[in-house]
Amino acid sequence: MEKKVFIKTFGCQMNEYDSNRIYDSISKIGYNKSEDQNNVDCYILNTCHIRDKAKEKVFHEIGRVKKIYRGKTKPVVVVAGCVAQAENQEVLNRDPYVDIVIGPQSYHKINDILKTYVNKKKIEETEFDSVSKFRYYDGIENKNNSVSAYLTIQEGCDKFCHFCVVPYTRGPEYSRPFNQIINEAEQLVKNGVKEITLLGQNVNAYYYKENSKLYKLSDLIAYLEKFNEIKRIRYTTSHPKDMTEDLIECYKNNKKLMPFVHLPIQSGSDRILKLMNRKHKVKDYLDVYFKIKKLNPDVEFSSDFIIGYPGETEKDFSDTMALLEKVRFVNSFSFIFSPRPGTTAANLKIINREIAKKRLAIIQEKLFKNQIELNKSMENKNIEVLVENKMLGQNKLFGRNKYLSSVIFESNENIIGNLVDVKIINSNQNTLFGEIRKKMKAA
Ligand code: SAM
Ligand code: SF4
Ligand code: F3S
């Protein structure tokens, strides 16, 4: 019998990718994707554990689901993702409304688990088994047919930054076989996808050897560029230590690789980077930055910053602000340090919250100003936009420019999936508003 499933996704792009693959998988046992979360047989929460707030959101959401289904038939409630992996049995103990807990490396078992969960016995599955997971994904069609799609090529992390849960929630670094990735890219192309974003917690650590041939991220980019149908290629998230020369060189010649590098630095102080166990210095980061800028001045950088890491002094913070004078970061993220259980920094003395909040406000003001300036600099210019979708109930289309900024413009034309030329009329911090000039390349 046909059943309905809704997945609520939290956290990073890797969770979005997994949620789509879970839909692909469980459609094989009769679960169809529903847009209406109020009336389903199975409710999956794909969760994030990166900061405490992210984790707490999950338990609020379970409370909300309980309310929705009060007086109705209870759906099977599944907690998947990084909270599932980190807290496993604890999730079941904390809220008996949850029926199944499944970690991100066990999704190849989800169909069997849902089939065997006939009645009332709670299930917890949090084994690390990336090989089986991706072999399983390889055997089921990726049905994603959006204009822009994610494709996970690497998972996990061996770097163990002292603040971070990822090595514990996603396990050791694993790179998918090259051919598996290409097969999946071909499926996406067949579905009409025009932009592929290659994903990994350390995507630029991608390293796959077969028959004495070594494949790196730069090889994947070069291979994907040959597909006529693919208009744009992106990758995220990178670690500065793995920005190797071959990858840097891609910014010289590759026409489809977008000139936008998301490269988290976390702090502009070498002292703090060392305390964080980041394995790179500010100079290493700047070397990469200047090399890429020299090859292609059009490239813009974005970053992640952790503010108020234990031990961060005024001097350390002013070093971070000084870095922002050297690099005009755009589209960046900044958060106050959140202690995560099980990580090395979990029990360090945290700095005064008010001071951390003030520092966050200062850095965000600067980062937002950069964003506003970049967007303003595009006003009255024609920029290339990949049209992703029509905005609900409006005569407007939504797309993104090369730096991943949102662009909204009026049009009645059927141009979703096309690269078009849009004249920017107006902008704010988050969005560019424009009018269509001409279609650039046929889709
Ligand atoms: N692998 C990437 C790298 O090397 O920078 C980062 C991936 S992590 C999933 C995304 C971002 O979350 C990090 O760059 C960091 O800024 C932030 N983050 C991770 N742990 C955090 C914590 N305990 N508190 C605040 N922010 C955190
Ligand atoms: Fe987390 Fe990135 Fe550090 Fe790995 S490299 S521990 S994912 S911040
Ligand atoms: Fe969150 Fe897990 Fe991604 S902790 S950021 S969902 S890898």
Image (cartoon, rainbow, N blue to C red):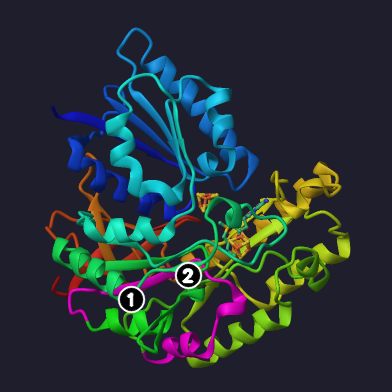
- Provide the residue designation for mark 1: 178
Q: Is residue 292 above or below residue 438?
A: below
Q: What label sits on residue 203 in the rendered view?
A: 2
The reply to whether discs 1 and 2 touch (Cβ–Cβ < 8 Å) is no
In reply to whether residue 268 is colored magenta, the answer given is: no
Which sits earlier in the primary sequence, circle 1 or circle 2?
1
The answer to which image quadrant residue 141 occupies is bottom left
The answer to which image quadrant residue 102 occupies is top left
Amino acid on which disc 1 is placed: Phe
Residue 347 seen in the figure: yes
In the image, residue 379 lies at what x, y percent? 41, 68
Q: Is residue 83 left or right of residue 427?
A: right
Foreground pick, 340 / 247: 340
In reply to whether residue 245 is colored magenta, the answer given is: yes
Q: What label sits on residue 43 in the rendered view?
A: none
Q: Which residues are magenta?
A: 227-253
Q: Which secondary structure lies at badge 2?
A: helix
Task: Count neighbours of disc 1 (C-alpha within 10 A) and say few if under 14, some if 14 to 19, many if 20 or more.
Answer: many
In the image, residue 264 lies at what x, y percent? 60, 67
